[in-house]
Amino acid sequence: MTIEALVVAIAMAVAAGLIGSFAVMKGISLAADPLSHVALPGIGIALALHVHPVFGAVVALAFGALLVWALEDRARATTESAIGVLFSAALAVGSITTTGEDLIDALFGGAGALSLSEKVFGLSVASAIVVFILTSKNSLVVMMVSPDVARTAGIKVRRLDLLYLEAFALTIALGLRYLGVLLMGALIIIPAVTAKRLSQGLNSMLWFSVALSVLSTALGSAIAAHLHREAGPIIVLVATGLFLLSLLARRQRSAN
Amino acid sequence: MMIDASAENELEVSHLSVHFDATRVLTDLSFNVAKGSSVAIIGPNGAGKTVLLRALIGSLQFSGTVRWTKGVRIGYVPQKLDLERDIPITGVDFLSARAAVAHKPAVDFSSVLAPVGIPLEVAQQPIGTMSGGQFQRLLIAFALVGDPNVLLLDEPTAGVDEPGQEHLNELVRRLQKNQGLTVLFISHELSIVYKNADYVLCLSRARTCFGPPRTILTPDLLREIYGSEVSYHVHDN
């Protein structure tokens, strides 16, 4: 992995750590995995049209997030059940439109070196997500505790909810080249779940989540390079290992 | 539809109706709330008291008109929130978030925590570990950070112990009298309603009514509203 590619991967990890923190605190962590599958039909259609697959994934994910947002309101369904419906449909369409080698790359990532446009996309989208979370974290906290209270505090709840879901979808798109459709949801959620176990307050949650996500990505990439394996699965295994360590740390703390 | 109320009224509600699918919860409700007054909302469970407050803050779709006065700042204290016990947000995080949303650079949290009787050490704990009463008080402190001119309280003393209830009732009464806040509160404690409210809005399937406590809290009317005998103690002071 080149230094430039590592920088893009770290930027993706920072965005994933921040977005994941709020997904876990909002209680929609189970939604991360299904929503990432919505990228699959977008990749298939993009390949059929000879367009860059990440572009197809971004469009599909952005549309998926919009659909979830609309379903939440109109059908009064929970986010998770709305995403569950999307997941089934997307997987069916995706498996028809994406086949063979392309399907494996889409599911697990890691196909070749990053192009200049991919690096620019990665860095700019990751920066936008980081800026969004850092400038909206207070509104997100109030909305998370009570949308009604948030509304009286002057927060545009529905708009913020849509922006968060779109940022969530874009974070998934960021990781598709490294981790693929199946594993990116894991990088968003596992470090944040670990951070939640270790944190007592908001700032420590955000710092732990980002640090664990970056550590998983950097360490996973280094181990993968050493073993000549794809980085995605190793990154997720490192994140899972850190989660298991947090279980031991907590147990030790309780015993003392 | 929400437009500005006239100068003397904080709130004007006209022909307000709310329904969920085929179920009508509120029907053709009209009342005005004068600035600086205290209005108690009473009625049996399921009469639509919480629905009314949520319609007033724009959280529910309704037909009719809700007019708040221009420049209104509402502090809303909901009844009960289901929070995960291990959510990593402290009381101070929550208050800081409110201050940041209101673009207040530095807030002396003791000035909003002391009146509601929460020590700073308690506010530094995660909100999921607070007792129901502590979290209820934190919500009132949260509302006060926004420097409100209207307080909407949905059973603010539910889950609070007896001394805490008296403390909170006294706090709300003091805020209304000293700072001129307009207060709308839902309560099942008719003695508190009699003592603290300037007006009472009653909601029930049978009828709705609005007026001073002396004319609303009569045995006949209460029997009609609740469907059974209701008694309460009137404090002499």
Image (tube, coloured by chain):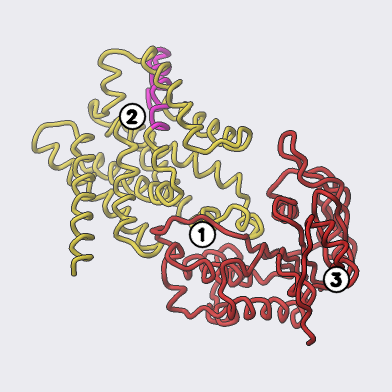
Please tell me whether residue B99 belongs to the stretch shown in magenta. no
Quadrant assignment, res B234 = bottom right
Q: Residue at x 63, y 54 (%)?
A: A148
- Residue A114 spot, x, y in % from top left: 28, 31
Specify the colour of chain B. Answer: red
Amino acid identity at mark 1: Asn
Tell me the CA gap for discs 1 and 3: 41 Å
Q: Magenta stretch?
A: A34-54
Nearest the viewer among A229 and B77 is B77
In the image, the chain rendered in yellow is A
- Residue A18 spot, x, y in % from top left: 39, 51
Where does label 3 land, which residue?
B213
Amino acid identity at mark 2: Val
Give the main secondary structure, helix, strand or loop, of the magenta stretch.
helix
The disc placed on residue A181 is: 2
Where does label 1 land, which residue?
A138
